Amino acid sequence: MKLSKELYNKDTLIKTAYVFTDRAYIHLDMDESDYIVEIIPKDTTDSGIIYKEFENELIFQEARKTIATDTKTIREMIIARAFASTMVSIDGLEETSQNDYSADEILKDWFEENG
């Protein structure tokens, strides 16, 4: 199977190949413009469909990479907010220091209150 280097990323191809290592022997190579993939199924009854499944997994992995790239900023903001030393309101205008809360408010057991 030949796959265009312009269409697929090398890391995506390797991740896809890894998914299939339990079902097939995978050999990866490349020339100037394409990746070359050879798949030898471990189970001979799997030989006809495994290339189609490989192609689907390749598209899935490429979509995951695109989504991760597109949502990187928002994920970083969520993590930064979760670990920030102050809590900032949604509109960014109001800041409340974590020191403004008493230990009783922070250390309440949810099950005691709601269970």
Image (cartoon, rainbow, N blue to C red):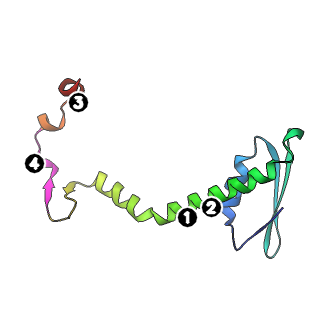
In the rendered view, would you say 68 is above or below 115?
below
Q: In the rendered structure, which segment of residues is drawn in magenta?
A: 94-102
Q: Estimate how packed mark 4 is, as few (under 14), some (14 to 19) or many (20 or more) residues with alpha carbons within 10 Å.
A: few
Residue at 80% over, 48% down:
50
Q: Which residue carries the number 3 mark?
A: 110
Asked whether, in this view, residue 11 is left or right of residue 53, the answer is left
The amino acid marked with disc number 2 is Glu
Q: Estimate how packed mark 3 is, as few (under 14), some (14 to 19) or many (20 or more) residues with alpha carbons within 10 Å.
A: few
Label 3 to label 1, Cα distance in Å?
38 Å
Circle 4 or circle 1, nearest the eye: 1
Q: Is residue 14 above or below residue 2?
A: above
Picture quadrant of residue 41: top right
* Chain-order first, disc 3 or disc 1: 1
The quarter of the image holding the C terminus is top left
Contact (Cβ within 8 Å) of mark 4 with mark 2? no
The x and y percentages for residue 95 are 15, 59
The residue that mark 2 highlights is 62
**Mark nearer the N terminus (4 vs 2):** 2
Q: Residue under label 1, please give it.
A: 66
> Residue at image x 84%, y 61%?
1
Cβ–Cβ below 8 Å for labels 2 and 3?
no
Labels 4, 3: front one: 3
**Given the image, on which type of amino acid does mark 1 rest?**
Thr
Name the outermost residue toward the right.
44
Cα–Cα gap, marks 1 and 2: 6 Å
Between 99 and 8, the residue placed more toward the observer is: 8
Residue at mark 4 = 100
Amino acid found under the numbered disc labelled 4 = Asp
Q: Are dots 4 and 3 in contact, CB under 8 Å? A: no
Please tell me whether mark 3 sits on a helix, a strand or a loop. helix
Q: CA distance from mark 2 to mark 3?
A: 41 Å
CA separation, marks 4 and 1? 41 Å
